[in-house]
Image (cartoon, grey):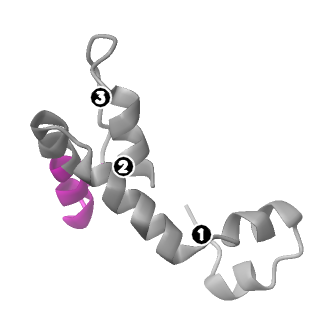
Amino acid sequence: MPTPSMEAATRATNQLIIDELDYDMPDEVSKFESLVRGLNSYQHRVFKSVVDTHHRGEGGLLFLYGCGGTRKTYLWNTIAI
């Protein structure tokens, strides 16, 4: 699937795109580091597995499942940021 170039993104006139690109990088890094520190050992293994899979270019479909209260949403937020 083709993706837009950064040049096209920087010339965007669509307010939704402009809003999406308007973020504070140091703040995002700080949020990410805080989220990673909050992972328990099992979540950290899953996080590392997802990141390693991505870095190796081995895309695919990954499922995250577990009982309620196992902090799945927290892990997804950490991966997504």
Residue for badge 2: 79
Q: Position of residue 57 (x, y in %)?
A: 25, 63
User: Which amino acid, mark 2?
Assistant: Ile
Q: Element under label 2?
A: helix
Q: Position of residue 27 (x, y in %)?
A: 51, 69
Q: Residue at x 69, y 88 (%)?
A: 7
Residue for badge 1: 3
> Relative to 44, is 7 above or below?
below
Q: Residue at x 32, y 15 (%)?
A: 69
- What span is in magenta? 48-59
For marks 3 and 2, the one nearer the N-term is: 3
Which label number is shown at residue 52?
none
Badge 1 density bin: few <14, some 14–19, many ≥20, Cα 10 Å: few
Position of the C terminus by quadrant = bottom left
Alpha carbon separation for disc pair 1 and 2: 21 Å
Query: In front of the other: label 3 or label 2?
Result: 2
> Relative to 39, is 30 above or below?
below
Alpha carbon separation for disc pair 3 and 2: 11 Å
Query: In front of the other: label 3 or label 1?
Result: 3
Q: Residue at x 43, y 43 (%)?
A: 77
Alpha carbon separation for disc pair 3 and 1: 27 Å
Residue for badge 3: 64
